[in-house]
Amino acid sequence: MKVSIVIPVYYNEENLKPLYEDLKKKFIDVIDYDYEIVMVNDGSKDNSYAVMQELAQRDKNIKIVSLSRNFGSHAAILCGLERCTGDCAVVKAADLQEPTELVLQMIDSWKRGNNVVLAVRKDREESFSTKLFANTYYWMVKKAALSNMPQGGFDVYLLDRKVIQVLLSLDERNSALTGQILWSGFKTEEIPYVRLEREIGTSKWTLKKKIRLVADTLFSFSTLPITVVSLVGAISFIGALLWGIVVLVFKLMGLIQVSGWTTLFIFNLFSFGMIMVTLGILGGYLWRTFDASRNRPTYIVEDENILADKKKEN
């Protein structure tokens, strides 16, 4: 049996050595089966890749890859999954906010026959704003897109080899990997945990990336954007029709004077705003279709030590 651990890295130079020591103490030194650690540098401009190279020299079971630029965690994880060789793979962040003990718990669950094991956050030792965004996002996804999304969400998970093969075969762009995992429908177990406060470094999870995640999830797994626009359009049409009938009846009855330009201007302004919103949503779908049709690679590898290792094995 062989277990792979896939770690996307983005500006984590200070975390990597403590992360490896934590893995060594709580995972590597206590198991009696093969393992490998696949670290993928997602375009970090700090010394993350240099630290990764140092760790790879210390442990021959560490494989490292460096992407040419920041392609996002989705692409970095896919890169790691493509290069891992284990019977299952555990995807783990590099920020030390998830207890390493979860790895062994997830492997035990996998041994019991679960194809997917999710480490689900039951609470967070984080700021109010971070909690608010996370809770809102996962609530929205659960209601509008994926009904099997855990309430607390997940970033750490284990995937069986056949699940990995399915995810790699999807080859979807502008999507959310966590959504694809839930959509695939494999036998799943959840393990609750408390997400720890970050002690080393600062998060690069910007507002722009959060908005992109929401858009990718809703456009990929939900009809909500189109449904909302259609519903508002229908309500606007019915409202305008009823308002026109009311004005006509009151005018014929002599109860009102000819309507002024203010009402017409407000209605036109509202209609113009709705048209622009509709075009924006349709443009989002069209862009995703166009981006997929270009067949550009999901990521570009700048450097890696895996090919050299394979040549040695051959």
Image (tube, helix red, strand yellow):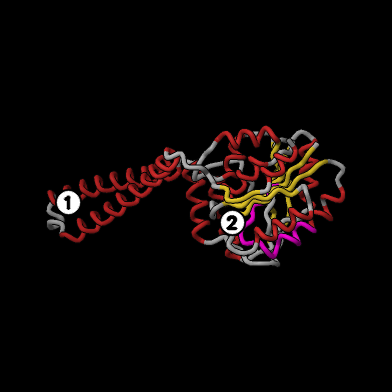
Q: Nearer the viewer, residue 173 or 118?
A: 173
Task: Establish if 267 lies above or below 158.
Answer: below
The x and y percentages for residue 88 are: 73, 38
Dot 1: what SS?
A: helix
The x and y percentages for residue 112 are: 79, 35
* Viewer-nearest of discs 2 and 1: 2
Query: Is residue 209 toward the left or the right of residue 278 in the image?
Result: right
Using the rendered view, name the quadrant where residue 288 is placed: top left
Tell me the quarter of the image containing the N terminus.
top right
Which residue matches tag 1? Answer: 250
Q: Which mark is residue 135?
A: none
Q: CA distance from mark 2 to mark 1?
A: 51 Å
The x and y percentages for residue 260 are: 15, 59
Q: Is residue 81 visible?
A: yes
For image coordinates 30% across by 49% down, the residue present is: 275
Query: Is residue 130 toward the left or the right of residue 59 in the image?
Result: left
Query: Is residue 181 toward the left or the right of residue 252 in the image?
Result: right
The verdict on residue 229 being magenta is no
For image coordinates 68% across by 59% down, the residue present is: 95
Q: Is residue 120 visible?
A: no
The x and y percentages for residue 118 are: 69, 45
What amino acid is at disc 2?
Answer: Ala
Magenta range is 6-21
Which residue matches tag 2? Answer: 134
